[in-house]
């Protein structure tokens, strides 16, 4: 019967032998880390890709539906225009002006004489705010000092 003994490299090559063993272990460790990283990243990437695909399908559906709706509206508008072009033009003009001027604080008035009157409402509103801010401190200064009693502030009707 034969016995196996542990094989020990000679002392002259022991360092190289240890380096080879460490390199083999490092290789296996790096392979395992890469596999772990791939197992983590791939499902996330696949999920993100699926989400982007679904979002693009939803966007496509939204755009197609919007286009079909606009096309149907245009077809209806065309039939109305063919029936009464002048009325339809006037209605479209008024709807467009209403949509455009709804976001402004300026008012344009047709006086009937083919001239337009411009009212700077934004400046009038600002001026009234400034006047209001000037009047309120004057009222507060004219009132007798009643201290910081909260109850008196709420009872005083002039402050309201």
Image (cartoon, grey):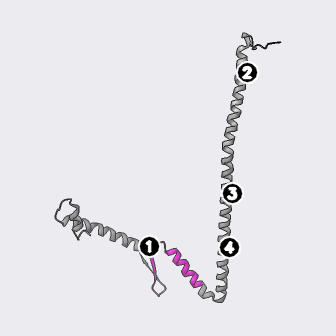
In the depicted view, which residue is nearer to us: 109 or 65? Answer: 65
The residue lying at 65 percent from left, 89 percent from top is 83
Residue 108, how many percent across, how many down? 46, 79
> Which quadrant would residue 153 be assigned to in this image?
bottom left
Any mark on residue 105, and which? 1
The residue lying at 66 percent from left, 63 percent from top is 58
Quarter of the N terminus within the rendering: top right
- Cα separation, mark 3 vs mark 1, equals 44 Å
Q: Nearer the observer, disc 2 or disc 1?
A: 2
> Looking at the picture, does residue 44 appear above or below residue 58?
above
- Sequence-first tag of 2 and 4: 2
> Looking at the picture, does residue 103 appear above or below residue 44?
below
- Sequence-first tag of 1 and 4: 4
Q: Is residue 131 magenta?
A: no
Look at the image and give the residue range highlighted in magenta.
89-111
- Cα separation, mark 2 vs mark 1, equals 82 Å
Residue matched to label 2: 20
- Cα separation, mark 1 vs mark 4, equals 34 Å
Is 23 on the left or on the right of 97, as rendered?
right
> Looking at the picture, does residue 151 appear above or below residue 70?
above
Quarter of the C terminus within the rendering: bottom left
Q: Nearer the observer, disc 1 or disc 4?
A: 4
Any mark on residue 53, and which? 3
Residue 79, how many percent across, how many down? 67, 85
Disc 1 secondary structure class: loop
Q: Is residue 96 magenta?
A: yes
- Sequence-first tag of 3 and 4: 3
Residue matched to label 4: 68
> Looking at the picture, does residue 138 appear above or below residue 80?
above
- Cα separation, mark 2 vs mark 4, equals 70 Å
Question: How dense is the environment of label 1, judged by Cα within 10 Å: few (below 14), some, or many (20 and up)?
Answer: few
């Amino acid at each position: 019967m034969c016995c196996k003994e542990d094989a020990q490299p000679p002392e002259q090559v022991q360092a190289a032998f240890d380096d080879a063993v460490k390199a083999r272990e490092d290789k296996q460790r790096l392979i395992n880390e890469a596999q772990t990283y791939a197992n983590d990243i791939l499902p996330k990437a696949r999920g993100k890709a699926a989400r982007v695909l679904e979002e693009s399908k939803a966007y496509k559906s939204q755009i197609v539906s919007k286009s079909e709706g606009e096309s149907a509206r245009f077809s209806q508008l065309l039939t109305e225009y063919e029936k009464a072009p002048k009325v339809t033009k006037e209605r479209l003009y008024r709807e467009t002006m209403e949509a455009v001027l709804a976001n402004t604080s300026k008012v344009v008035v047709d006086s009937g004489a083919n001239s337009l009157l411009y009212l700077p409402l934004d400046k009038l509103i600002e001026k009234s705010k400034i006047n209001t801010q000037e009047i309120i401190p004057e009222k507060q200064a004219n009132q007798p000092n009643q201290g910081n009693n909260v109850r008196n502030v709420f009872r005083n009707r002039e402050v309201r």
